[in-house]
Amino acid sequence: MKAFVTSLRGQLILLIIAALAAAQLVSLWLFVDERAMAVHMALGLETAGRAANIARLIEEAPPELHDSILRAASSPLVRFSLTDAPSVDHTGHHAGGMVEGTIRGMLPDREDRQIRVELHEFSPDMLPLEGIPRTMAEMHRAMMRDQISAVEMQLSIALNTGQWLNVDTRFHNPPLQWPWLSFVSFGLTAALILVAVVWFLLTGLTRPLRRLSRAADRFGRGEEVEELAATGPTEVRDLTEAFNRMRDRLTRYVADRTRLLGALGHDLRSPLTGLRVRAELVEDDETREHLIETIEEMQEMVDSTLSFAKGVATREPSVEVPLGDFTAEIADDLARAGNSITVTVRDNPLVTVRPMLLKRALRNVIENACRYGARAEVTVTRAGSDAVIRVRDHGPGIPEDMLDAVFDPFVRLETSRSRETGGTGLGLSIARTVIQSHGGDIVLENASEGGLCATITLPATPTDG
């Protein structure tokens, strides 16, 4: 689930679903608001029509029937009364223009008739209208227990008799009936259809991105990567084509540098051979031996450089090997040559490597530990997504300020200049170059209990689950 949420596809799908849910909630809120307005308007216009009919009836009926008409027209939430002065004592209306227009349309005999309208909300805990029977008041209070919002409208209509018909009414929004089943079924159906469509569309985007990511990772480890086909949206195709161009340029650059290095080492062999012949002709024994030793040292450097250049230039195929077994095999070969080595395999992670190239790098590191630290302790384990090899010796260690400098070409801490004890100074440089070409790294540190510890990390093959 975490992988889905953190992926591009998952985040886009969750974003779209969230936007859909927000749109549905806003639509529902607008629907409720419009519904309340429609209910208010309908009830207000119904009351206006009722008031206009009562006004016409009173104007046409004899005075002795007026009280009976008013009692028959009144209800718990609508009260009619006749007074000499209007109950609405001002002419300014509050949202009553449509109500007034409805009344004037039903009483067209007098265009100058005064009609006053006042609308305002009132608290649901207000008592019903005064003067209604007790049973009706209790029914009203029972309705108001639901805290239904209410609006009070007051009308004052001038009559031909010189009196005013006053109307005081309160109407409520009916309880909102939530169509949960329809709402949930619609939401689920829309979400499923949306997810299916988006999933199909995003596959065309994420598949080339995943392929590009894997190719970049393999190329960073020095593996052979074929040119990728440009597919997907325009931006992804542009990115793929840019990766292909970068791959071609880096491949040419590395090949040119390797060829230059190999050619330089090869061309140095002839003059070195000539110098060796001339050195043999020197009569002074001490000078002759010193010259020959120096020339042989230079010859060994050239041979090491050529060997490394050939190894890098060779496009060795990458294979998947268990690192513990691979390391143990190298250690056994070195042990048969008289080196003191112990190997502990705590985990045996799979790694994708170029075997001959990595074998040379590991041999250099383990041989250094045996040469300068008497014996080597090799441990293979796994740390998260990395395979780890630790090579510890029991020698004097390295000064802290030289822990990184020893990886530079031809740097030797041993000052005797003897090839038997000091080598050429290329071993660790070659080892780090090879390990980094596999997407890993090597770090040196002095162990607290003495000796030097070299920690090599390589990307391990992901395990299922």
Image (cartoon, rainbow, N blue to C red):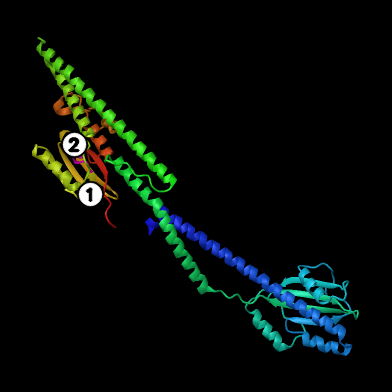
Q: Is residue 96 visible?
A: no
Name which quarter of the figure residue 419 lies in: top left
Q: Nearer the viewer, residue 198 or 152?
A: 198
Name which quarter of the figure residue 267 lies in: top left
Q: Mark 1 or mark 2, which is nearer the start of the sequence?
A: 1
The residue shown at (69%, 73%) is 40
Dot 2 falls on a residue whose secondary structure is helix
What amino acid is at disc 2? Arg
Q: Which mark is residue 360?
A: 2
Q: Is residue 242 visible?
A: yes
Q: CA distance from mark 2 to mark 1?
A: 19 Å
Q: Which residues are magenta?
A: 353-358
C-beta proximity under 8 Å, tags 2 and 1: no
Magenta highlight: main SS: helix
Q: Which mark is residue 350?
A: 1
Task: Tell me, yes or no, whether the highlighted magenta stretch contains residue 356.
Answer: yes
Going by the picture, which residue comes out furthest to the right?
Answer: 162
Provide residue 286's location: percent of width, then percent of height: 11, 13
The residue shown at (64%, 68%) is 33
What amino acid is at disc 1? Leu
In the displayed structure, 190 sits above or below 384; it is: below
Give the quadrant of the N terminus.
bottom left
As drawn, is 123 to the left or to the right of 361?
Answer: right
Task: Tell me, yes or no, whether the highlighted magenta stretch contains residue 149.
Answer: no
Provide residue 265's location: percent of width, then percent of height: 21, 24
Judge the density around disc 2: few (<14), some (14-19), many (≥20) Cα neighbours within 10 Å. Answer: some
As drawn, is 42 to the left or to the right of 259?
Answer: right
In the displayed structure, 204 sits above or below 148; it is: above
Provide residue 435's location: percent of width, then percent of height: 25, 38
